[in-house]
Image (cartoon, rainbow, N blue to C red):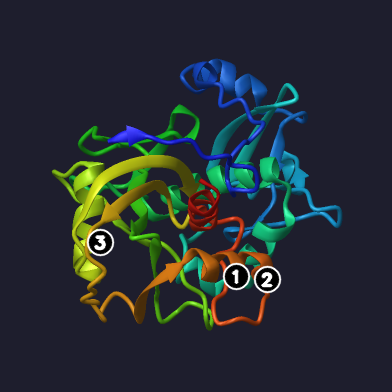
Amino acid sequence: MTTGALARPGMAFLGSPLDRADDIRNDADRLAGLMDWRARLLRLDGLAPVCTPDGTLEWGTLADAAPDADLVFLGLLDGKACFAAVPAEGAEGPAYAQPAIWRAMSELEPGELATYGAARSLVDWHARHRFCARCGQPTGIAKGGWQRDCGGCGAQHFPRTDPVTIMAVECRGKLLLGRQPRFPPRMFSALAGFVEPGESIEEAVAREIFEEAGVRVRDVRYIASQPWPFPSQLMIGCFAEADDEALTVDYNELEEARWFTREELEAARQAGPDGDGPLVFPRPFAIAHHLVTWWLDK
């Protein structure tokens, strides 16, 4: 798989100004020394961000946390230790059903959104992994929240990230896009799917495109990646080529899949995400937007 280049301004969840300070995570005494009145606590409404009127994340102090709250060390910002509290429950339902989160993705500055995204993934993982997958006993936070240890069998558990391939596929000057039933009307996006155990990124791209659209691809090329904290994925943007436009759509996965010409996609791009044409361009915060833009401009 060869590499590609993609300008990424506007892509969501990239560019957090936080210093993750791994050396502090591993030093319990040093970490405890930072948990004082100067430390900052990220305000969350469940798993949704609390934002100020000027479009930034709202921070409080550790005194704002519940007395029994589990605190996760996010890192250092302007020399101050930053934490987030683990909510009582993890994510309920898909992110696209939560208007407050989508609104924040459009309003927060890139660095702020990236800080929120990392925090959301981390505290959501803790909320959903309070018990050991090996023996079922309760687990506790370790290493500032970047690990959970089981008090029963001693197993160590670490926050996970699930790799997902998302692909722009070209055939004879056209691009393959699909839509799921949950998408807003007229919106199409690049096809995507999880990388399964025992396969490479290239194999995942080829398998997903064939399973969802019945298209065989070749020459898979990596373009760019994007963290996607719903709950904790790494979107691996790729490009591939096909020699046959014939489609066999898996309607369990997709509502529709189509090949689009450059002219159709360029018209949708010019109209913007709120355009009234037959195709709505993917939203700027999603890597699909940047994959299609990269293809149009290359």
Residue corresponding to mark 3: 209
Q: Is residue 69 visible?
A: no
Real-space Cα separation, disc 3 to disc 2, in angstroms: 28 Å
235 on left or right of 194: right
* Mark 3 surroundings: few (<14), some (14-19) or many (≥20) residues within 10 A: many
Residue corresponding to mark 2: 271
* Sequence-earlier tag: 1 or 3: 3
Q: Pick the quarter of the image with the N terminus.
A: top left
* Residue at position x 62%, y 47% in the image: 116
234 on left or right of 61: left
Q: Percent position (x, y) of residue 184?
A: 53, 79
* Label 2 with label 1: CB-CB less than 8 Å: yes
Q: Amino acid at mark 3?
A: Ile
> What secondary structure is marked by label 2?
helix
* Residue at position x 58%, y 46% in the image: 13
Q: Amino acid at mark 2?
A: Ala
* Residue at position x 29%, y 52% in the image: 241
Tell me: residue 215, above or below residue 16. below
> What secondary structure is marked by label 1?
helix
71 on left or right of 232: right
Real-space Cα separation, disc 2 to disc 1, in angstroms: 5 Å
* Mark 2 surroundings: few (<14), some (14-19) or many (≥20) residues within 10 A: some
Q: Percent position (x, y) of residue 261?
A: 46, 68
Tell me: residue 113, above or below residue 5. below
Q: Is residue 132 visible?
A: yes
Residue corresponding to mark 1: 268
Q: Nearer the viewer, residue 108 or 53?
A: 108
Count numbered badges in the picture: 3
